Every structure is written in C-alpha cells, then in structure tokens.
Amino acid sequence: MDGKEEEMVGIAIMVGVGVLWGVTRNYNGEAIRRLDKKEHPLRIWYPTACWLYHKVGSKIRWGDSKKDALQAVYVTESVEDAQLWFVCKIISLLLVIILAVGGFLGAAVMRPEEKTLVDGKYLVRPQVGELSREVELGVSIDGGGKGGSEGERFGVEARRYTETEAREAMRMVKEELPSAILGGNTGRDDVRQPLDLVNGSRGIRIQWEVDGERVDLEGGIDNEDVAEEGEPLTLRAKLVYGEWEDALEIPIVVRPPNYTEGERLWKDWDEATRRKGEESLTDKLWELPTKVNGKAVTYREEKDGLVPTIALLGALCLVITPYLFLMDLESGLRKRNREMLLDYPEVMNKFTLLLGAGMTVKGAWGKITAEYVGKKKKGLCSQRYVYEEMLATWNEMANGRMERTAYERFGRRVRLTPYTKFSALVSQNMKKGNARLLSILELEGMDAWEERKETVKRLGEEAGSKLLLPMMLMFGIVLAIIIVPAMMTF
C-alpha cells in the first residue's frame, strides 16, 4: 500500500470504531453504570463490548473449569454476569488497541515530511546557499532488472617487517599482483570491467601510475569508445615499505564493455539523468527522464518501515490480549485460594467464640457477615473472598433458601478442602444437633492455625527462592567491582 492507502486504512479504522461506539453507547447502560470504576477502568467501552458479545461472543462455549474460576474470582456476581464482565474487559481493551493502531497508522503516514519528488518525475532542489542533500528514490525500468549497492572497506595495519621479510613480501606481491588486480576480468589482455588496483598487500603499500586516461588510479576504466581490437596500456606499481622500495610494470589491453540489455538500460538512464540534471541547474525542479530507449521509467519515494511495524505490533497485541486475561484469571484464582486458606483459622476462631457465647450457627454466620459489611463500608478493611462467600450464603438464606442447602452450596462454591469440611460439619449439625459441634470446631481451629503456620512458612521459602537470582546478580557485581581493579593493576 502507498501512503494514501495506509492513511485511508487508519482513518477507516478510527471512524469505524467511533461509529460503532456511538451507535451502541447506551446498550445495557443501567447495569454498566452500577459497575465500580476502579475495577472496570474501561467501562466507557462496555456498551459496545456488551453488544459485540451478545451478537457474536455469546456463542462461545465456556468450560466448567473456566466457569468455576470466574465464579470464584467474581464472588459478588452471578456466573452469567461474571462471564459478561470478564469478556467485556477483553473486548474493551481490544477496541482500544484497534483504535490506537488506526491512530498510529494515520499519524505515521500523515507525519510531516519534506517532499523531494513532485509529479512523479521532478526533484525539488535545495534553495540557493543551502547545503546539498542526499535523496533516496526507488527507481524501476521496464525490463531493467534491479540495481546494486556499494559497501565500504576497512583495512588493518600489519606489523613491521625486517628487511629480509620486507624483500620477501615484495617478491610475493610482485608475483600475485598481475592476477590480483583483474577483478571481474578474464585476463590482462581482455580488460572490460573496472580493475582492483589495491593500495596494499601483505603489509606493502602500493602506489600506482597509469599511462593515458583510460584507467584511473581507483581502477575505473573509460572504455565506452574503445574499438574491439582494444588499446594496450601499462600499469606501473611502486611497492613501498618504510625505506625499501621496488617496482613492477603490468601490461594490459583495454577493450569495450559487454553490456546486457538491463545493464545498458541502467547505463543510459544514468546518463540521461545526469544530462537533465546539468541542464536544469538554474531551475527549481530537476526533471527526471520518464523514458529510456523506449522503456517507461517510474519513480516513487521510499517509505520507512514504521507503518508495517505498527500494524504488526497491533496485530500481536490483539492476539495475545485474550491469553493475558486468561492468565490473569488463573493468577486471580490462585490468589483467591491462598487468601481463603490464610483466613480460614480466623473464621474458625470467630465461629468458636460466637458458638461458645450461646449463638446459633445461623446467628454466628449473620454476626460475622454483618461485622464484615460494616467495616468494609467504613473503609476499615478491603474485600476478602471468604467473607464475600459467606455474605452470598447469608443473602441466599435471607431470600428463602434452606439453611442446610445454603451451607452445602457454600462448600461447593469455595472448592477448598478446609471449607468443604467446615460446610459438611455445619450441615450435619442441622441433622444431629450441635452438642459436639463446638468441640469439633475448636479442634478444627487448632489444626487450621498449624496449617496456616506451614502455609506461611512455605510462602516465605517461595519468596526467598525468587530473590535468589537478584542476590546472585548482586554478588556477581560485587565480585566484578573487587576483581577488575585488582586485575588491572598487574
């Protein structure tokens, strides 16, 4: 795509997303306005996300494990609402990414650039008194193939020879030089391409002298008007190393070049371009040739790789975003389970105290949840998963669900062994009475505190292992600070 097409794509993306948001901005608005802004920072996009989910995403099949994880992390929501808001988070971020990619594509194409090519064949010259500049154009000639490029060479200075070594090196250079300078030519009596007049070999500096003007000191040859029988020339090489010198004469025969059709086209294009440039030195515009030997020539300004890079990064973000959200969901589930296991001894302690004070199981349950709700409203505590689950169970009982069934559902929702055991004990209490429930819960509380100690110990060991790599890096830096100065003194 050229710049205009890329610009149109970026604008089309932004307009499309904007129109979609405008059309759907009031969709499911009442439910969305009740959401917490801190937990749902992209809430402004949720109407569009809900609309897309109900049109397309509602057909997605959720596995039981994903449903259980969503229900566990989003305790206060139903399974359907948890699915909806989780997907809305993903879709909203994807919409923001798409909008950002469209904006960056448009900005990358529309960013100000100094125009150097006008009407496809005129080069804009710098103003009088300005420095010359370098312009890069892509050039294509029908049937001309592709052009080449030149590199840059660097040499490494050799050690100094003794006189014997220098003389021997010069002798070897004199043997090698006649064939070494040929470059792409087949022989010294058939020179049609530039020569490789090296400035040095084996540490010996070489100075060249050339008869006539057919060959320059860089090895370039001017053989456009040479007859096929060729012109004989002599190359004189002066070999110098310090105070020692030697000389060598190399006879050659320069012949006319053998051009392919494509090479001839490029040669003629280069000549036509140079000629038009010389003719237009006083003009503001440099007209480039549009035909060479009857072949059409087109020009285009080369673009950098920013636009495809932005598009690639945008596509990559769109692909990995859902996976990141699923990974975040799994991480949230692990965090929730760890938090609930750490809170279990506290819950057992509160139940034991309230039951020992003569309260019923339901009364103790309501007392604990009411205390949690009061502290949360006053900002004295943050959300805790175990109390949110207990609050959900309390609301079920308040809405008419049987007490025993509510306790059993509590254990199934939490899906952690200690809480499953606790819900079973409370449920059995509804059948057999609570004569031994207090003593059983006291023993369970003692076991829970021991388990919590082990859990905290394990978490501490995990934290220590995570710090091992940074500690090793710091140790390596300290060793380097000590050893490097010590070694530099030797």
Image (tube, rainbow, N blue to C red):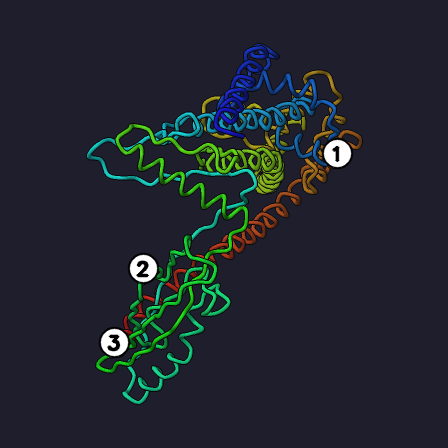
Q: Mark 2 to mark 3: distance in Å?
A: 59 Å
Q: Mark 3 to mark 1: distance in Å?
A: 68 Å
Q: Position of residue 388 (x, y in %)?
A: 60, 28
Mark 3: secondary structure: loop
Q: Is residue 285 above or below residue 196?
A: above
Q: Is residue 259 above or below residue 376?
A: below
Image point (63%, 18%), residue name: 50
Residue 64's label in the rendered image is: 1
Of the residues under marks 3 and 1, which one precedes in the sequence?
1
Residue 51 location, quadrant: top right
- Mark toward the viewer: 2 or 1: 2
Amino acid at circle 3: Thr
Residue 41 appearing in the image = no
Image point (29%, 81%), residue name: 246
Q: Residues within 10 Å of mark 1 (few under 14, many from 20)?
A: few
Residue 117 appearing in the image = yes
Q: Circle 2 sits on which residue?
A: 213
Q: Residues within 10 Å of mark 2 (few under 14, many from 20)?
A: few
Front-most of residues 73 and 37:
37
Residue 31 location, quadrant: top right
Mark 2: secondary structure: loop
Q: Position of residue 430 (x, y in %)?
A: 76, 29
Of the residues under marks 2 and 1, which one precedes in the sequence?
1
Front-most of residues 301 and 434:
301
Of the residues under marks 2 and 3, which one precedes in the sequence?
2
Mark 1: secondary structure: helix
Horizontal side, residue 178 vs residue 46: left or right: left
Front-most of residues 392 and 241:
241
Horizontal side, residue 287 vs residue 40: left or right: left
In the rendered image, the residue lying farthest to the left is 129
